[in-house]
Image (cartoon, helix red, strand yellow):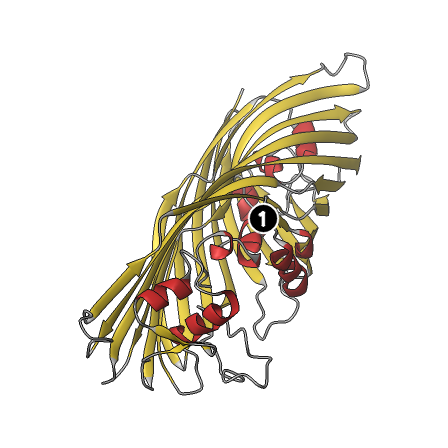
Amino acid sequence: MLGSAGKSFAQNEVDALRYSRTEFGGTARTMGIGGANVALGGDAGSFSSNPAGLGLFRRNEITVSAGVNVNEVGSSVFGSETSNSRNNLHIPGFSAVFTTRKADDEEGDWRSNSFGIGYTRQNNFNQRSFYRGSSGVETMKFGEYAAQRANAFGLTPNSLQELAFETYLIDDVEDNGYYTSPNLVDPSTLQENIESTGAQNQWDFAFGASYRDKLFLGASVGLTTLRFKQSRIYTETGPASDITDLTLRDELTTEGTGLSLRVGAIFKPSDMLRFGVSVQTPTWYTLTDQFSTNLNVNFNRAPEDGASLNQSFGTDPGEYEYSLSTPFRATGGAAVFLGKNGFITADVEYVDYTSARLSSDDSFQSENQSIQNVYDKALNYRIGAEGRFDVFRVRAGYALYGDPFKNSDVNQARSYYTAGIGIRQANFFIDGALVYSKYNSVYTPFVNTEFDDPNSEFYEVLTPTVKNSIKNTNFIATVGWNF
């Protein structure tokens, strides 16, 4: 959503969810089975799910992964449909695990221990979307939104309402507040280009140990880095009127680091069965936003004597530092091995999105209240299987990540369909995986803050609501060496 410069420019419940709703990652083997590896172990995918899995390593291992991602966004507003896409190459992960193991005839309950360093991509922000539609009288325009903000907060420096006032889009009447002065007539065409880049990646420093080869314990420290860059160009165009069109451009870059802890265990009562559990603390982030906004309004006739037909005003480049803590996570899983023929595995993960918190020297009370009002608890389900045919491996999986919203007209759960193949040699392996995901989202460029006030002239005036259908195809290849 569009916002004013300063604290409220970008730091809100939308940002809290963006960095809290991570995806499963790891090696192509883990991706090929839908990320369901909490009870498996013995694979570098354990870095992103359960550090106890390092206790099942018997040899040292190094892996390197590479991927190609194709993102498509279909948008619908006012009955008009558009689409856009963005492709990118990426490095989803690499790892190094070093293992010390006792010989089979050597005494001792603790049979092995492993230390590992792993890098995993948790989120890929590369996306491009575009919508366009023709609005009617009942739809709020940007000038009306700016007038609302001016009446509520005044002409605060570096705000959207200041931009609108300086470009003659809104005006004031003594003792009567601000109003739209002139505005686009209906029907008007609204459109917006939104492009984002960046990623959220985590470095894990993990330790795992084996107790009698029955109980495996592990712990890790995670250092997360993120960079999110977004540019938005919002345009309103109308037929013959005082204003021909307006364009709002804003740029946002968010960078930061976070710290988290994870502990886990895997119990192996028999060669056929394994149970796993993993708990991750919130990730505590320190983030910095850099932002700027510019509004350009073109007139058919001068808004006042001596004024230019083209009016432009921009905010000073801004910077703001704040903190974010993401939700606690708990995951449980089980795996059943079918002798040497393969296995079936499944996980369930619990995430409480209402527990995310923003903080800084300024108050985030209203934003944190919005997090609790808008979001909900969710369960993420993952299931996968691997078939073994001599040195060849065939994999498939499915994951369903629950809708984090309490009340929404659109189901925003995410579905993942995965498949993979692999070849295993004594000291070398190569795996490939294909992950196809799809989900829906809802976006509005601005909010009618007076919708619930029946005495307001804006009562029951709707804001443009864009429904997005996102499809993502990700191909990952992993090469690994054992020694």
Residue 17 is situated, as x and y percent measured from the top left of the image, at: 57, 55
Q: Residue at x 40, y 82 (%)?
A: 79
Relative side of 81 to 221, left or right? left
Q: Which residue is more in the foreground, 108 or 6?
A: 6
Identify which amino acid the numbered label 1 is placed on: Asp
Q: Residue at x 19, y 72 (%)?
A: 309
Q: Residue at x 66, y 43 (%)?
A: 282
Q: Which residue is more in the foreground, 17 or 214?
A: 17
Residue 422 is situated, as x and y percent measured from the top left of the image, at: 50, 40
Q: Look at the picture and state if 158 lies above or below 443.
A: above
Q: Look at the picture and state if 254 lies above or below 73.
A: above
Is disc 1 placed on a helix, strand or loop?
loop
Q: Look at the picture and state if 294 lies above or below 268.
A: below
Q: Residue at x 70, y 32 (%)?
A: 52
Residue 275 is situated, as x and y percent measured from the top left of the image, at: 76, 42
Q: How many neighbours does mark 1 have within 10 angstroms: few (below 14), some (14-19), or many (20 or more)?
A: few
As drawn, which residue projects farthest toward the front? 174
Q: Which residue is mark 1?
A: 362
Q: Look at the picture and state if 421 lies above or below 391.
A: below
Observer able to see residue 56: no
